[in-house]
């Protein structure tokens, strides 16, 4: 039995539950390794059931051998109606209104308790096998960045460069991207989540590239900002300010430190050049089976860093109508500080 199952079963026993229901794809993968999009896991102290439809029977048997497989003929939850269940945990933040109605209709006498926060807590600290997959995903992304430096040219569009990054990652071991790739040039880079467009890269452009991939279900995430042609003095001031803020934040990451204080260290650094007002998002977020999960490095976070947590460190400056600069690394918190699994250079890169 996996450590994940043991922790869930301990929670079930400690809280007098008859079991828990898992319905979201990320948690179904995390708990059972299942990647289909129609699933219900039922976990109790003595049963682990995976309920799906006939499209996924063979897949479920292959991916989730620890679970008893049930092929539903109708509603997935309907397969539990004869079990006399009285109190179940469920994913309140992942269940639709229609699903909850179905739950209550099928299990009329059952009380449902939201365990979303419990599941988030269990996923915060990664096991070594999870960390190895994240390292591999980060390595593929690093290789994609090296490739794009030899591929990208003035005159190419944002969209062309983004597609080449994605193609390279898939060709070199990734099973997919962990989020929609961002390639944003010049003033477009001032949009933190810009979508690549048909704008051609011009001489003098500062270009933000934010991308990542999935490897065996685990994500990577990195950002580099490069220059096409010689950068002007203002662009360099922004870039160096962001790089310094990131270096300071990275030096503050270690076990026992609050996520809030790490975020603040980057803001304090940017304040020295009066650029903190252009830093409009949190410093970072957790990464695992989803590219955005806990803990957050944020002014509003109550998290304390623990060994085995995986977080991004991504300060950015976004000046409307002028430029955007973001530099992002993916790190694993450990007893010595952190292991940076993003290896790509952060020196100023000038494309000719």
Image (cartoon, rainbow, N blue to C red):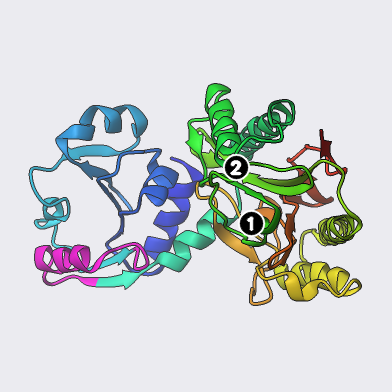
Left or right? Give the position of 336 relative to 259: right
Left or right? Give the position of 264 relative to 165: right
Judging by the rendered image, the residue that carries numbered circle 2 is 158
Instruction: Estimate the x, y position of residue 89 in percent, counting from the top left.
Output: 32, 65
Residue 311 is labelled as none
Q: Is residue 137 above or below residue 109?
A: above
Q: Quadrant of residue 78?
A: bottom left
Instruction: Estimate the x, y position of residue 291 in percent, counting from the top left.
Output: 54, 50
Instruction: Sort mark 1 into few (<14), some (14-19) or many (20+) by Cα contacts within 10 Å.
Output: many
Q: Tell me the element at label 2.
A: helix
Judging by the rendered image, the residue that carries numbered circle 1 is 188
Q: Quadrant of residue 253?
A: bottom right
Q: Quadrant of residue 116?
A: bottom left
Q: Which one is nearer the viewer's eye here, 315 or 201?
A: 201
Give the residue drawn at x 22%, y 44%.
51
Give the residue drawn at x 72%, y 57%.
314
Number of numbered discs overlaid on the protein picture: 2
Residue 105 painted magenta: yes
Q: Is residue 106 above or below residue 140?
A: below
Q: Which residues are magenta?
A: 91-111
Instruction: Estimate the x, y position of residue 26 in percent, counting from the top left.
Output: 42, 49
């Amino acid at each position: 039995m996996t450590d994940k199952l043991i922790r869930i079963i301990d929670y079930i026993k400690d809280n007098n539950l008859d079991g828990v229901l898992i319905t979201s794809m990320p948690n179904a993968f995390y708990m059972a390794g299942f990647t289909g999009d129609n699933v219900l896991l039922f976990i109790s102290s003595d049963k682990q059931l995976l309920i799906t439809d006939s499209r996924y029977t063979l897949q479920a048997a292959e991916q989730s051998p620890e679970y008893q497989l049930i092929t539903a003929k109708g509603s997935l939850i309907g397969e539990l109606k004869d079990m006399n269940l009285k109190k179940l945990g469920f994913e309140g933040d992942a269940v639709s209104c229609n699903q909850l109605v179905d739950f209550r209709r099928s299990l009329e006498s059952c009380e449902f308790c939201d365990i979303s926060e419990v599941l988030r807590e269990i996923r915060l600290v990664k096991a070594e096998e999870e960390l190895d997959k994240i390292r591999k995903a980060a390595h593929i992304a690093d290789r994609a960045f090296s490739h794009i430096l030899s591929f990208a040219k003035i005159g190419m569009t944002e969209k062309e460069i983004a597609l080449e990054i994605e193609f390279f990652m898939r060709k070199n071991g990734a099973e997919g991207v962990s989020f929609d790739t961002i390639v944003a040039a010049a003033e477009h880079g001032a949009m933190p989540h810009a979508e690549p467009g048909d704008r051609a890269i011009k001489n003098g452009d500062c270009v933000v590239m934010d991308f990542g991939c999935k490897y065996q279900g685990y994500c990577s995430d990195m950002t580099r900002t490069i220059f096409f042609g010689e950068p002007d003095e203002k662009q360099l001031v922004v870039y160096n300010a962001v790089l310094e803020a990131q270096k300071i934040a990275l030096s503050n990451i270690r076990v026992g430190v609050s996520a809030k204080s790490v975020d603040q260290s980057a803001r304090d650094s940017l304040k020295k050049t009066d650029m903190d007002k252009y830093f409009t998002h949190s410093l970072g977020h957790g990464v695992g089976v989803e590219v955005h999960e806990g803990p957050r490095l944020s002014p509003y976070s109550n998290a304390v860093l623990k060994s085995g947590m995986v977080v991004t460190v991504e300060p950015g400056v976004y000046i409307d109508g002028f430029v955007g600069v973001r530099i992002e690394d993916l790190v694993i918190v450990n007893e010595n500080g952190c292991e940076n699994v993003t290896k790509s250079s952060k020196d100023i890169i000038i494309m000719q």
